[in-house]
Image (tube, coloured by chain):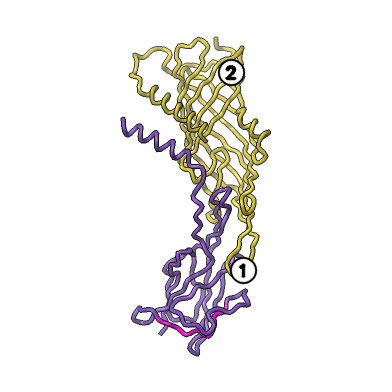
Amino acid sequence: MRVIWFLILWILVAACLDEQDCLITSTNLVKFSFKNSKNAAREIMFDEITVSGLANKYYVAAKATSVQLPVTPAESEVTFILSFENRVETLTVGYDIATEIISKDCGAFTNYINLGVNTTSFDSLRVVNNSLTINAAVNVEILVD
Amino acid sequence: MWRYSWISSVLVCLALSAFAQKEKAADSTRGFQRPTGIRLGTDLISLGKTFANSSFSGWEGNADVDFGRYYAALDYGLWKRDLPITNGTYQNDGRYLRVGMDINFLLKDPDKNMFFIGFRYARSNFNEQVEYQTSPIEFGDFQMESSNLGAKAGWVELTSGLRVKIWNQFWLGFTGRMKFLPHVNGNPLFETYEIPGFGQTFKGIYWGFNYQAFWRIPFKNSK
């Protein structure tokens, strides 16, 4: 009998749930981390990084073991050009753009999912997380000797 | 919402009470019998919401046929929503069909008034689209749009309610619905927000309520 009352209570509580939590974890920043051949973090002295479709330059004369770069909702792929240590490497990532409405008050937002590397001049890399989220999880690990 | 919760708790308690009754000896009122008429009706709440609520328009028709204490039930509805959201607008437009059966627990009422418990399986075909403003980092403001055209959905309902003969062949009644197990086949890049006939999909369980008016048409060969 207790189980039945618990079930009734659960159903009523579930039915009273009017709105989802307004918690948006999506972002349009993709995070790359750099590793050496021993799988340790590799610090890189960047000259600059450019992003297709944007005039701005990022990480100009900056040291970093990881970078976060923006992708656009207007396209399904973006190319990054990374200049560092007398090298120029390119990396094109592709992704799907998904829409979700949380609630009337939270509105609609964009998820960037199914991230993949379309082309690259780097010798070795791997996608470790194919969704872009604000918790700053690494999306792509790149091996740099 | 509290109104629906109160109605829901009454319905659940009534349903449990009915199920808890010990089975009585079989009698002639309990088996399948030849149908005596068809009841055709409409949901007055949908019509009221259409006139009172600028974001919703819809209509629902209901029909049932008696086979003794068992009633085959069919519902067909139209549903259109034009909903402003905080950063844009959401719209859907679709139709839905429910098929199922009700079991009458008032077996000896001379007017065939009903207190019933039943179930439905429902399908909905619909389109939905959203236009919204977003501000991705470094790219400024963007106007985005996404659509889910020709989507199909299904769900299951447990129903309970009353049908009361008011005058001649005119009946009034209400139906409470516990809707659950929604499933959608549509655009995977646009998560369905609301299924016409069901409601918002993020709720695994959704409550519905109809207040219905019926006209009964007796079959000629029935008493």
The answer for how far apart the CA atoms under marks 1 and 2 are is 60 Å
Range of the magenta residues? Answer: A42-50
Residue B95 numbered mark, or none: none
Say which residue label 1 marks: B139
* Quarter of the rendering occupied by the C terminus of chain B: top right
Most foreground residue, A127 or B138: B138
Magenta segment's dominant SS is strand
Colour in which chain A is shown? purple
User: x, y percentage for residue A23?
Assistant: 49, 55
Q: Is residue A43 magenta?
A: yes
The 10 Å Cα crowd at callout 1, few under 14, some 14 to 19, many 20 or more, is some
User: x, y percentage for residue B195?
Assistant: 55, 43
Q: Where on the picture, by quarter, is residue B139?
A: bottom right
The amino acid type of the residue labelled 2 equals: Trp
Residue in the picture at 45% in, 16% down: B106
User: x, y percentage for residue A3?
Assistant: 32, 34
The amino acid type of the residue labelled 1 equals: Phe
Say which residue label 2 marks: B171
Q: Is residue B99 left or right of residue B213?
A: left
